[in-house]
Image (cartoon, grey):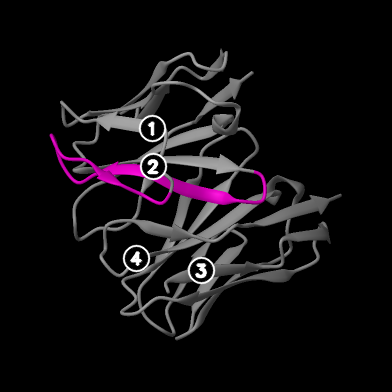
Amino acid sequence: EDQVTQSPEALRLQEGESSSLNCSYTVSGLRGLFWYRQDPGKGPEFLFTLYSAGEEKEKERLKATLTKKESFLHITAPKPEDSATYLCAAPNQAGTALIFGKGTTLSVSS
Amino acid sequence: NAGVTQTPKFRVLKTGQSMTLLCAQDMNHEYMYWYRQDPGMGLRLIHYSVGEGTTAKGEVPDGYNVSRLKKQNFLLGLESAAPSQTSVYFCASRRTASSYEQYFGPGTRLTVT
């Protein structure tokens, strides 16, 4: 069964304290791994797509990486404005929809 | 470009009432989706459309109907609202069959009392 699992559910960091969020997937014939950011009361905002193992994408303090079984979202020296829920997703086998993980809620305090 | 817009932003219904949520996109995207998001449940797909005039069921379609009469619009209907349909509803669109990233609207918060 296609599945996307994220951990941890919640993460609290101090400003400047780097960490990583995990997304593991069991989807046959992966056609991309997607990361989104969701702020409270808003819709998910697309961040990155990763297509093959070893690929990396960066945006400001965020770096996404992909292996054959999981993806990591590394947050370097986070700031309070990085606080949000981060979602990862992968296309289902039919390619008709994205399967979303339940998300990791990140809180960064100053 | 406005991207993906949703109308209304908030709505309160009484049990048994009906309503329609409107999603519009100005990006000429082929695919459109309706999700609901509930605490601890994540995003769950209700219905989707792979093109004008087509619709298909997602993971949680019961109690909802959809229509895509125009390419740019995707309507979600609740015929007889139930308290279990209290949720935040998101619409999303996707450019083509070969591009999988989806772009989301701002959401509609629906409360059924």
Query: What is the distance, in whole Å, between disc 4 and disc 1 at their CAs?
Result: 22 Å
Query: What is the distance, in whole Å, between disc 1 and disc 2 at their CAs?
Result: 6 Å
The residue type indicated by label 3 comes to Val
- Would residue B55 appear left or right of A45 to someone viewing this image? left
Residue at the spot of label 1 = B64
The residue type indicated by label 4 comes to Asn
Point 73% across, 58% down: residue = A78
Label 2: how many Cα within 10 Å (few below 14, some 14–19, many 20+): some
Residue at the spot of label 4 = A92
Residue A68 x %, y %: 45, 86
Point 42% across, 33% down: residue = B63
The residue type indicated by label 1 comes to Tyr
The answer to which of marks 4 and 3 sits earlier in the sequence is 3
- State which mark lies toward you, 2 or 3: 2
Residue at the spot of label 2 = B61
- Would residue A58 appear left or right of A15 to someone viewing this image? left
Residue A49 x %, y %: 40, 64
Residue at the spot of label 3 = A4
What quarter of the picture does the N terminus of chain A occupy? Answer: bottom left
Query: What is the distance, in whole Å, between disc 2 and disc 3 at their CAs?
Result: 21 Å
The residue type indicated by label 2 comes to Pro
Label 4: how many Cα within 10 Å (few below 14, some 14–19, many 20+): many
Chain assignment, label 2: B
Residue B3 visible somewhere in the drawing: no
Magenta-drawn stretch contains B26 = no
Label 1: how many Cα within 10 Å (few below 14, some 14–19, many 20+): some
Residue A12 x %, y %: 82, 58
Chain assignment, label 4: A
Give the secondary structure at mark 1: strand
Q: In the image, is residue A7 above or below residue A59?
A: below
Query: What is the distance, in whole Å, between disc 2 and disc 4 at their CAs?
Result: 17 Å
